[in-house]
Amino acid sequence: MKRLSLALPLCLTLGACAVGPDYAGPSLSLPAKWGNAPASKRPLASKALDEWWKRLGDKTLNGIVEEAVAGNLDVASAKARIREARATRRQAVGALFPSLDGTGSATRSRTSAATSSTGGNATSSLYQAGFDASWELDLFGANYRGVEAATYGTDAADEDLRATLLTLVGDVTSNYVEARGYQARIALARRTATSQRETEGLTRTKFQAGSASAVDVAKAAAQVSSTEAAIPSLEAAYAQSLHQLGILTGQAPTALSGRLARGGPIPAARSTPPAGLPADVLRNRPDVRKAERQLAQYTAKIGQAEAALYPSVSLTGNITTSALKTGDLAKNSSIGWSFGPTLSVPIFNGGELRAAVEVAQAQRDQYDSAFKLSVLTAMQDVENALVSLAQERLRSGKLSSAAASYRDASRLSRTLYQSGSSSFLDVLDAERSLYSAEDTLLQSRVAVSTDFIALNKALGGSWTKPVEVSSPAVVDVNTGPHPRTGY
């Protein structure tokens, strides 16, 4: 009551005030540099990450990304959430202004002869019209805090769309790279099986000439079958990546099968995006920005709940006119009006209002923790992607050298086997090792591109072109008054 006795005269004098905490961005202690990247003194400019997927040098991929942004259903949902947030803010803004309602009525009445003063039946009409107005003064900022929270909520919805686009572009690119990787591995398995079948034919010829055994022929045939057995699994994995790409673009699972059927190289980027500073994730990661806006939103909600503890003052008024004929409403009519303030003071509510404040404070604390966790997670994503990309590139280089050596060994062993200077086991082992090395190398190349994608996502690289959000996905028709159908 002491606080109320001080605050009420002040707010009445100033016209309005606000209760509850004013939002201030949280202070965080972040490292000065990344642990797995060269030290940098310059912040990472967001433009350095613009259209990062184009650095993979694949025009087909670029076109699929464009289609996904236009047709993805998660993006459509994010757009709808933006429209919802903007409409919610307009609702909150409306509470700051007066409201005016118009009223009108027409009454036809009949009085019987027993009660009529004239001794006969009497019929009369009464017409009324008027206006009712009200305006909450919002002395303690309940509506103001509501607008503030709704504004922060709109910002969070905008960041949610950007985060959805970041995830979408990364998923599309990853699935495309995986699809090309499976195609390359399928082609390798078929080439290897063809080469191994040639070895089988050579072994049969030598067997017929008496210089090879039936065991060698059986082993050669088994190796061909073993290599060919890998193809169905790879085809199934390729189909799954292809189907996921179709869904990501908002189309049927097999919508892109014709476009990818011709095959293509595994997309690869030679460069590594600059990592910048750890503090850059606060500016470049949309999921971090979304978490910060949600923290601001729920900080404002504390003030909204706090204002309910204070009195509310509203100005209300009405004016009415009554007449026996509609034409007399504006001239030969009785006119009445009323105007005055209404004061509502919370006296006893069983602690409900104070509990509502504590609920809002607890929710704010949850979003404070969520924001800090989003920053730590973003930093972890960058550190993981940096080390994974660097190490996988080293691994890929070693695998490339190993595959080249196994290729030479396979060629030499076959030549020596044809001349009778080497055993069939040497050929069998060399061909098996070559296939394994080349297949592992293809998987490593896919991993390098996948790590490149993960690093760009972790740094906040996303879609930067404007996205139309104002148009609803579903256009309603015949929304005016019309006959009801059904229940």
Image: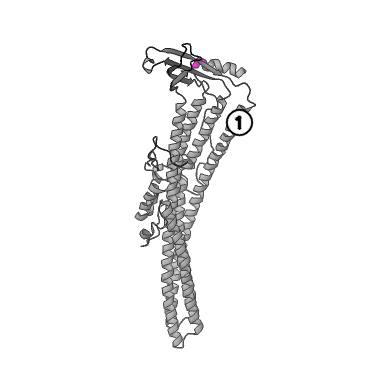
Front position in the image: 402 or 260:
260
Q: Can the viewer see residue 426?
A: no
Which residue position holds label 1? 358
Q: Between residue 418 and residue 366, name the one nearer to us.
A: 366
Q: Is residue 56 above or below residue 113?
A: below
Q: Residue at x 50, y 84 (%)?
A: 214
Q: Secondary structure at mark 1?
A: helix
Q: Quadrant of the N terminus?
A: top right
Range shown magenta: 12-19
Judge by depth and name the residue closer to the eye, 27 or 90.
90
Residue 178 occupies which quadrant of the picture? bottom left
Q: Classify 436 as above or below 136.
A: below
Is 16 part of what is drawn in magenta? yes
Q: In the rendering, at what x and y percent does residue 11 appear?
A: 52, 17
How many numbered marks have been drawn onto this rendered protein structure?
1
Structure colour scheme: one colour
- Per the picture, the main secondary structure of the magenta-coloured stretch is loop
**In this rendering, does residue 342 appear at all?**
yes
**The furthest residue to the bottom:** 210
> Where is residue 275 drawn, in percent x and y?
45, 46
Callout 1: 10 Å neighbours few (<14), some, many (20+)? Answer: some
Image x and y of residue 135, in percent = 47, 20
In percent of width and height, residue 9 lies at: 54, 15
- Give the residue displayed 38% in from the left and 57% down from the top: 256
Residue type (three-letter) at the residue carrying disc 1: Glu
